[in-house]
Amino acid sequence: PRSTQSRVPHDPTTTASSKKQAATTTMTEVNNNSDEFEVQALPSSSSSSDDGGLVKAKTDDHGDAKAATATAAAGDKEDMAMVESADDLNSFWERQAKRVARNSCAHFWAALILAIVLSAIAIVVGEFTVSANTGGWTSRGTLIGDRHTQVGLVNSFQVSLATGGDDAWLELINNVQSGWEDDDDEVDRRRSLRGGGEADPDQDYWIERGLSERYDFPAQAQTFADLMTPTPDRILSLQQEQRRAATRKIPFQSATTMTVNEGNGEARRLQTDLSGIIPGCDISASSMTILFSEARLWPVWKTSSKYKTALDPAVMEDLCVAEQNSLKVLEDNNFCDKCAEGGTKCVPPLSIVFYARLQIADGFSLTCAELAEAWAPLQASTEDQWQSCVKTLKTEYDPESETLPEECPLGFSTMMVNDDFDETKLVTYTSSVFYSDPNKTDAIYDVEGQFDRGTSKIEGVYDTQHEDFNNIYVDSMLNRDMALAMGSAILVAIAILVHTRSLMLTGVGLLQIIFSFPLAYFVYKLILGLDFFPFLNFIGVFVIFALGADDVFVAVDKWKNARLDHPAASTEYVAAAALPDAASAMFLTTVTTAVAFFATAICPVAPVKMFAIFCGLLVLFDYLMNVVLVFPALCIYDHYIRASPNGRPNCCISFTCCNRGGNDDDENNDDMEVADATGASGATNQEKPSLIRRAMLAHFEFASKTRWILLVMSGAALGITAYYASTFSLPLSSDVRLLAEDFEYEKNFLWRQKLFYDQLQRSGGSTAFVIWGVNPADTGDHNDPGTWSTLELDSRFDASSEAAQEHILGFCDDMFSNEFASKPTSDYVCAFNRFDAWLKEESIKDDQAAIYQEHCGSAAGVPVAPENFDACIGAWAQSEGDTSILLYEGKVQIVFFTFVSTVRYDDPYDVLDDEWNEIEDWMGQKNADAPNGCNRAYFSSEDFWWYDTNGQMLRTAYGSAGIALGAAALMLLLTSQSLILTLFSTLTIGYVLTSVIATLVSLGWTLGFLESICVAILIGVSADFVLHFSHAYATLPGDASKEERTKYALVKMGPSILAAAFTTMASACVMLFTVITFFQKFAVILFMTIIQATAGSFIVFVALVLCVGPTNPTRLFDMIVEKCKGGKKDDEDAAN
């Protein structure tokens, strides 16, 4: 109720008879030394009484120490008039506050013990461990997510379904399968896609039959960086990449033929059998295929501005030396493929140095200096050859071609040149591929600091082609960054200590924040039953330390203001006056911040959803612990100060113990507060304000004089920032990078994008599937990547009719006739089409296969008679070892085939979106034309799943922003009971958001995966400060000028807001020193949000209320309430 939250308690000492009372009663003074609120009592038997006794006071406007004492009888009525009675405050919440004040120790210890017990239960029963669970970074429960969940199940268990009989089907149909992204296995975090970390029996099945090329083996290496950055070896299985590399000649394919012009002008093609070129080394085409298909050491080199091409002999000499030195490190540690079994010499890396040695007689026996000298005459002709090769590749390259064009010379590889070589003839970027041991990547990472990084002519950065070094480094930095985030707690503790100048209040404030974590975990794990605890949740520790201190500042300052207004009042009175008001103010910001977090839980990506829920719980429990711990602690604090000799408690209670005795000096006088700086209580005896309050008053005077200028500037700022915020664009790539661009491993990735091979790799597209017979569904726990789903069959699928057979038969060719789809390999034929060809072949044979004679009814092709279809195609699939046609209970239940899409996961979001919609529209039309029984086909791919995940994150940012803004506006309306203040506050919040986003635009940011998370969860933070000001503005009762209300809000809440802003920005500054970009971006957005929220509150909101603010904000609401009450009373009178 408004009467219990916003009422300013009446001060009996400011009545008309105050002069008479001052002459006959005890003189009082508020000792505001160190911003504390102390009533100094003379040592006597009555000094501990809350409602009477002898009080010593020292008052002097100029800071000189003066003392005046007087005595009054305990029963004197005039003396009692000086002391406020707690009975004057008797609303429900005020009674609860007085109850806490009377039994503050009991309340404090009861709450503390209960918090300890619940925390222990949460940690022990909830099995809390400090670990970084990094799975789940894909959308679940969405159309695309449901589709690929079923496709993934079928693809992973296709052999079991084909060979395991009905039991295998029932296992998948009735039981939710283990998740494939569960990182909790402490024995082996690099789990298979199937989950469980065990060997895949399906893999052995195909290997035994020599048909491994038909099975897509699960991807490995589910590390933190893998899951956040879906590199091609995750999006496509490793075996898929190998098969495609063998047929598409990317990314490392060397030219395996060369053209030799003979006298007759005819050209003949010579195979490049390089065996024997290096004595004792086998670098044949087969060994090169192995080199490209496995994780190898792969440095990328960049020339200096002075030496513009790596083909310069001087640069090549330095590159040669660097390669030899790095090769020596691999040799010394036995980390490379040797030239001969039992030998010590490593196979040299594939690079432009290797190419140069191929072109020169006895090139492999030359020193680097000799090689450079011999290379000089060949540089110009090589540049011409390579330019012709690159131009041809750009215009005529066919991904399905078995070879590179004839223009490409012996030993050339697209990884040797940059993409624009055909225009510049300069090799600015090049790379080397070492024959390092792919099974010793972790060990190679440990010695990578010994590798030669080049000279001033050419610089090298090291990693593998699968970014193993990058992934290992990111994983190692994760715990370090999380520990650094915890370091922000130290800054928060210092800030609370400086603000309160009390070790006791600082300790209790930290306990309040610390206990919120295990208590939130108690509800999260044991009540809500959420098992998945992603690494993002640990950022909640940083968030709650940054935001939790705000509540401490509000509670302390509310108490301080109440004690200043009522220096002679009892602790009960101050508690009744301060605590409900503090609880109300904190409740506003708690609700808006918690709603902002909970709103982000609409995201279907499990780590983000769990993070949002957990942080929302943290905010709520921080508020609760503030009420049950800090409030009683403030009462204890006040009791100790009033009961201590000379008002000087021990050092744990107050730092004033360090200044016992003597007169207060000028420094202490800086902390003297105003008994009522705003005149709200009507006191006439003013004292010198503290520094922070003088600053607030100065700001009020400045804002009052320049209000209209500030209003115009605020409107202009809102318009400008809104315009630039509207330009916040989507990223050019959907890839998620976790390291800054100046890190070596990130440089390796970025420089690699400059190589010509990358363009060819991108043209290779990505693998996708078309499937019939399963419904898109995900029946597992969407909040836990440790669970997958059951197999959901489409009971309406029936491929046996002749029309259905003909439709599926023609579907494959129709699909490959579109530009958005191509065959996985040049000789790929869909299973249904191969079945048709088999039938045609068998029908004309004299010695027909037994299965044809037994099951196919002499069919000469598709369609087969419906009564024979299932048995015929099932027998054929089993004989062929084909698992793309699966039968359940003797009926064809699942049919699927593979195609290659033209896009990849790291293409721009708009490109992926256009491709998805084009294929979806085409599939929709095909289904519309399909006969019943086979008109529910759909397509899916890992790349489109990642596209959906990015899209869901963007939609989450917009959706949660709308929810948070709506919640903030609703809370403002309910608490301020003023439409005008709600409008002003909403405009201020709008300014904060647009200005922050405009700043991010100026920094070159785009609205990518990480940015959308940060923006979504920090919307609630942007509303906190203006909520405090709006609440304080409205709580001044009755008609008061807008100037008085603004001054009141600034003086009452300004110090708390500035203290909260400082601690939050300081904590954000700590996070800027982290390594992982997610933490850095979170810190930058938080830092900018706090700066703009402070500016918006102190400038934009203040300018609005000073210019056109209401003098009685609640007048309209009060009129409506009165009218409703009056109408109800009239109805009651009429009824009587």
Image: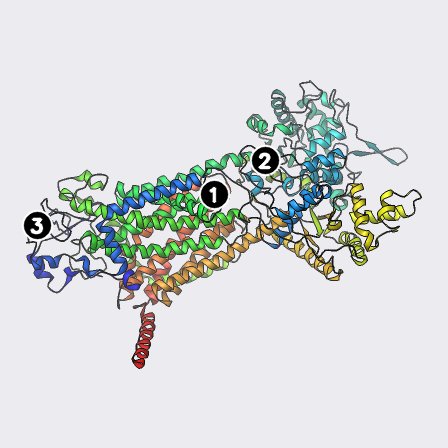
Q: Position of residue 235 (x, y in %)?
A: 64, 43
Label for residue 190? Answer: 2
Report the side of 475 relative to 682 (left or right).
Answer: right
N-term-proximal mark, 2 vs 1: 2
Q: Amino acid at mark 3?
A: Ala
Q: Where is mark 1, residue-wise? A: 1079
Asked if disc 2 and disc 3 are in contact, CB closer than 8 Å, the reply is no
Report the side of 101 relative to 959 (left or right).
Answer: left
Q: SS of the residue at dot 2?
A: loop
Pick the front one: 185 or 117: 117
Q: Position of residue 682 (x, y in %)?
A: 18, 62
What colouring does the structure picture have? rainbow
Question: What is the crowding at mark 2: few (fewer than 14 residues within 10 Å), some, or many (at least 20)?
Answer: some
Q: Where is mark 3, residue-wise? A: 68
Q: SS of the residue at dot 3?
A: loop
Pick the front one: 572 or 232: 572
Q: Amino acid at mark 1?
A: Phe
Instruction: Quarter of the image for the C terminus: give it.
Output: bottom left
Give the image quarter of residue 964. bottom left
Asked if disc 1 and disc 3 are in contact, CB closer than 8 Å, the reply is no
Q: Is residue 148 visible?
A: yes
Report the side of 610 relative to 1118 (left or right).
Answer: right
Q: Is residue 896 visible?
A: no
Pick the front one: 1089 or 645: 645
Q: Position of residue 650 (x, y in %)?
A: 20, 39
